[in-house]
Amino acid sequence: RKLSRVTVPVVLAALVGLLAGTGAGASLALLAQATAAGGSTMTTAAKFDIVPPTIATSVIAKATGTGQYLSRSIKRSGTFYVYANVTDTGPAASGVATVTANVSSIKTGATAVALVAGTYSVGGVSYNYRSASQSATATVAQSYSYSVTAVDNAGNSATNGSFTATVDSTVPAGSDVQTTNAGTAGMPNAGDTIIYTYTEQVDPESIQAGWTGPSTAITVRFTLSGNTVTIWNAANTTQLPLGSVALGAAYITTATATFSATMVQSGWTITVTLGSLTSGTVKTNTTAKAMVWTPSATATDGAGNACSTSSKTESGTLDVDF
């Protein structure tokens, strides 16, 4: 049988039997909403959003570089973004109205920094809210907690205060430089490696834009004048900020010699592996020398601190490299 209209009472009378003897009357208001169902109209109880938003994750990362690959640390006076993943769910979700972060422990007075909806990525992790660029206070230098608050359009509010960030004031530096041999001892060959070790992990994006650490093509250039090795991009047009290594002896007979190569980052180490010789002529060196590496200040750590340019001498027993 088709119903032309179903009506739900909008006011329930006093529940006399339930409240008998209390001396009080009571009423319960039940709001209603009209819903079309074919040719009929059905009046049903209205649904209300009573579920606050969920703040799943948040991270702070420096506001420099191409993709903020290393996160959770910034430097004194450095600029940074606050990222968060916020959703509003439930049977009557009204949507996220505002998202703010209290980062006053890192930036004086920043108790309600607004985050804006969008599509963002930090270290391969996606976030849907981000703040404008903020500047850390010049005197902070330790690990700090911060919170993120979200409010939906129904006024429900949630705060997650479990997030942390480190303000790092320590600059990275060169720790060691080594080579390994895969062919003729004392002669650069395919498979030989140059291993650059820092005092902490450097941001791979500060070495090459968009690089996140896996094997990538580069060029290794040997220069006879000064007997140095430098690292260049795959096209051999731009020097990469791995500094220069003084070999202390000649390993080539031409003014320059170049190898196709790859580099890969693992923690604090960047390993360069020689491929094929693409120009020039190499020779065998039999004189044991200690290499000296002078890093580049363009390389930075995850917080954005520039690398020290103090030179570092190869550790261990004197040997013939490559």
Image (spheres, rainbow, N blue to C red):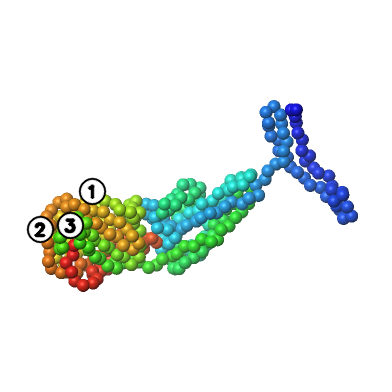
State the residue lying farthest toward the left: 253
User: In 3D space, how far apart are the residues under numbered discs 1 and 3 (Cα atoms)?
Assistant: 20 Å
- In which quadrant will I find the N terminus? top right
| Local SS, label 2 | loop
User: In 3D space, how far apart are the residues under numbered discs 3 and 2 (Cα atoms)?
Assistant: 15 Å
Residue under circle 1? 235
Q: Amino acid at mark 1?
A: Ala
Q: x, y percentage for residue 58?
A: 50, 56
10 Å crowding of disc 3: few (<14), some (14-19), many (20+) = many
Q: Is residue 24 left or right of residue 74?
A: right
- In which quadrant will I find the C terminus? bottom left
Q: Residue at x 33, y 60 (%)?
A: 266
Q: Is residue 244 left or right of residue 2?
A: left
> Toward which corner of the image does residue 167 lie, by quadrant?
bottom left
Image mark for residue 122: none
- Which badge, 2 or 1, comes first in the chain's sequence? 1
Q: Residue at x 58, y 57 (%)?
A: 159
> Toward which corner of the image does residue 173 lie, by quadrant?
bottom left
Residue under circle 3? 189
Q: Are marks 3 and 2 in contact (CB under 8 Å)?
A: no
Residue under circle 2? 253
Q: Amino acid at mark 2?
A: Thr
Q: x, y percentage for residue 316?
A: 23, 72
